[in-house]
Image: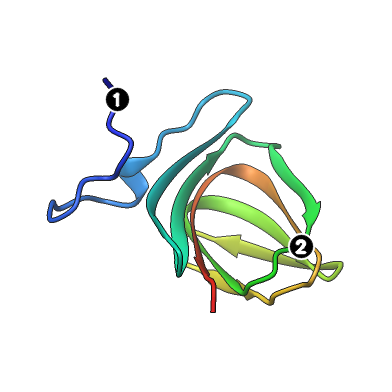
Amino acid sequence: MEKKEFPKAEKFNFTDSVTYADGSIVSKILLRNEKGNITLFAFDKGEMLSEHTAPFDAIVQVLDGTAEVMIDHKSHILVSGESIIIPANLTHALTAIDRFKMMLIMIKG
């Protein structure tokens, strides 16, 4: 049976905790509760999340590779180690320029 909850009180590496898959976007939830969530993503080159909005601010932390993050129709190129805050209710989209991994943190209040 697959573990649904990420292990707690155990050492881990964000980048190694999610793996790439050809032609896909892979996601892995680290934490989720009524206050927000932290999710890891691995995008194959060219994969994208289409334009959408969210009701809460979100932080994108690029762990590996290069991504284009569009916020309110403005392009931001992020590389490993860089972050950006996506303001609540603004349109945004993500595209993998190269394969990339990110951590998404959303706080609901």
Image coordinates for residue 69, horizontal then vertical, percent: 70, 61
Image coordinates for residue 38, horizontal then vertical, percent: 43, 58
**Residue reaching furthest right?**
73
Residue under label 1: 2
**Residue reaching furthest top?**
1
- Looking at the picture, tell me which residue is in the foreground, 4 or 46: 4
Residue 93 located left or right of residue 72: left
Please tell me which of labels 1 and 2 falls first in the chain. Answer: 1
The amino acid on which the numbered mark 1 sits, given as a three-letter code, is: Glu
Dot 2: element: loop
Q: Quadrant of residue 85?
A: bottom right
The amino acid on which the numbered mark 2 sits, given as a three-letter code, is: Thr
Residue under label 2: 53
Dot 1: element: loop
- Looking at the picture, tell me which residue is in the foreground, 84 or 5: 5
Going 26% across and 20% down the picture, which residue do you hit? 1
**Residue reaching furthest front?**
34
Q: Residues within 10 Å of mark 2 (few under 14, many from 20)?
A: some
Q: Which quarter of the rendering shows the C terminus?
A: bottom right
Vertical comparison of 74 with 29: above or below: below
Going 87% across and 67% down the picture, which residue do you hit? 73
